[in-house]
Image (cartoon, helix red, strand yellow):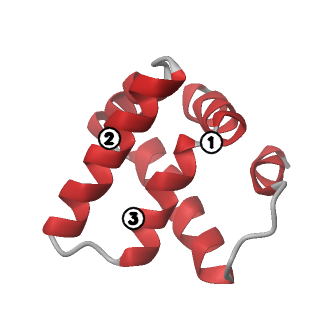
Amino acid sequence: MRMMNIFKRKPKSAGENESFVSLLRAAQDDDDLRATLCGILRQPTFHRQSMLNTMAGSMSADGVKEEMIRAVTALTDDAVAEEALQLLKD
């Protein structure tokens, strides 16, 4: 199962795992979200991190649950971003 490779580091809580999986599932089901995330994930590290931090800030301002915001910020890690991009492209 490819998705398990994303969690090489021990997550802070099971909720983070579920939120991350939910984020990727939502992106697989929603063409606009998938296109947005894939576009961000293809960026060089600095730009990707900046864009994801901006996205997380916007989500926070919109009242999105903290677990989902942490799922987005997990994508700032290079290995996590690469694995997520591969999952979203498949």
Residue 45 or 71: which is nearer the viewer?
A: 45
Instruction: Look at discs 1 and 3 and give the one toward the viewer.
Output: 1
- The C terminus sits in image quarter: top right
Q: Is residue 59 left or right of residue 26?
A: left
Q: Secondary structure at mark 1?
A: loop
Spot occupied by residue 12 in the image (x, y as percentages of width and height): 68, 77
Q: Secondary structure at mark 2?
A: helix
Give amino acid for label 1. Answer: Asp
- Tell me which corner region of the image, top left, top right, bottom left or bottom right, holds residue 9: bottom right
Residue 45 or 75: which is nearer the viewer?
A: 45
Give amino acid for label 2. Answer: Leu
- Tell me which corner region of the image, top left, top right, bottom left or bottom right, holds residue 85: top right
Alpha carbons under labels 3 and 2: distance apart: 15 Å
What number is the disc on residue 33?
2
Q: Residues within 10 Å of mark 2 (few under 14, many from 20)?
A: some
Spot occupied by residue 3 in the image (x, y as percentages of width and height): 75, 50
**Residue 48 higher or lower than 64, as above or below:** above
Alpha carbons under labels 1 and 3: distance apart: 14 Å
